[in-house]
């Protein structure tokens, strides 16, 4: 998470949605930077804890933004990340598995360590699935992301691709895709809303 008090803006960083590229482009302009385990603080935590603190401490009503990725593609990115040679021998290593097997792990009632990836819906919403992000942007439209940031930060923002997952073939069986969509129906529904809105979804007050 990055906070820009001068611009009343906060970046809620959802894993595997280009967060490294965004951080590299935006960090020079942030005055509060959350690191390590706090880097991926949820929208719920921001809404309940961080936003009120900023209002009390800095007298500013900070608005949040985040990026969401097509859910299957985001899980595929997690799979490729977990296939890295650096993880060989670790419980999180998925390099010996097919993407089908990885998704089976994600769908398990108790996911094994390699499939403990959380979800975008848990990062972005609160009780009842209510969106807690003020502006949600589609990962697939980087021109719009950069335009939004350039406008809010009053400077040209260009994001270079970074921390790109290795090229690993990762097809998914159609029947497993159907199970995934059913299991994460709320996440796919939110993404569909985002795309239907033109890749920029505003939270209702």
Image (cartoon, rainbow, N blue to C red):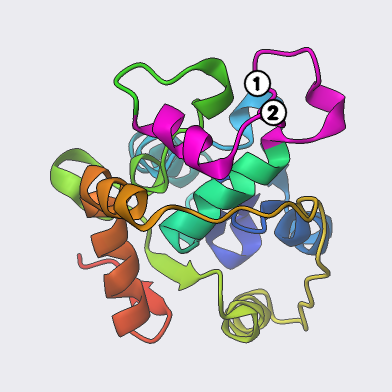
Which one is nearer the viewer's eye here, 166 or 98? 98
Which one is nearer the viewer's eye here, 24 or 176? 176
Q: Position of residue 96 (x, y in %)?
A: 69, 28
Q: Is residue 11 visible?
A: yes
Q: Is residue 63 visible?
A: no
Label 1: state its secondary structure: loop
Query: Quick check: 199 above or below 36?
Result: below
- The boundaries of the magenta stretch are 82-107
Q: Quadrant of the N terminus?
A: top right
Label 2: state its secondary structure: loop
Is 202 colored magenta in this rendering? no
Which residue is identified by label 2? Answer: 96
Q: Which mark is residue 92?
A: 1
- Residue lying furthest left: 128
Q: Position of residue 116 (x, y in %)?
A: 50, 25
120 sits to left or right of 185: right
Residue 195: quadrant of the picture: bottom left
Q: Nearer the viewer, mark 2 or mark 1?
A: 2
Are dots 2 and 1 in contact, CB under 8 Å?
no
Query: Quick check: 107 above or below 63?
Result: above
141 sits to left or right of 200: right
Distance (Cα) linking label 2 and label 1 = 11 Å
Q: Position of residue 114 (x, y in %)?
A: 58, 24
Residue located 86% across and 30% down the image: 85
Q: Which mark is residue 53?
A: none
45 sits to left or right of 17: left
Residue 108: quadrant of the picture: top left
Residue located 62% across and 32% down the image: 97
Question: Dot 1 surroundings within 10 Å: few (below 14), some, or many (20 or more)?
Answer: some
Is 89 colored magenta in this rendering? yes
Q: Position of residue 6 (x, y in %)?
A: 64, 62
Query: Quick check: 200 above or below 42?
Result: below
């Amino acid at each position: 998470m990055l906070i820009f008090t001068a611009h009343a803006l906060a970046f809620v960083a959802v894993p595997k949605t280009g967060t490294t590229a965004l951080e590299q482009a935006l960090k020079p302009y942030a005055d509060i930077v959350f690191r390590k385990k706090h880097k991926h603080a949820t929208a719920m935590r921001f809404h309940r804890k961080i936003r009120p603190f900023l209002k009390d401490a800095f007298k500013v009503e900070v608005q949040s933004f985040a990026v969401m990725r097509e859910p299957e593609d985001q899980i595929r990115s997690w799979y490729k990340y977990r296939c890295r040679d650096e993880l060989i021998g670790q419980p999180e290593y998925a390099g010996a598995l097919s993407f089908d097997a990885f998704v089976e792990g994600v769908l398990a009632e108790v996911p094994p360590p390699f499939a403990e990836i959380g979800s975008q819906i848990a990062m972005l919403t609160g009780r009842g699935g209510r969106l807690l992000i003020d502006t949600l942007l589609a990962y697939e439209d980087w021109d719009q992301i950069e335009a939004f940031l350039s406008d809010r930060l009053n400077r040209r923002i260009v994001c270079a691709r970074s921390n790109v997952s290795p090229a690993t073939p990762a097809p998914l069986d159609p029947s497993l895709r159907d199970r995934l969509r059913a299991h994460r129906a709320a996440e796919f529904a939110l993404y569909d809303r985002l795309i239907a809105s033109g890749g920029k979804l505003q939270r209702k007050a």
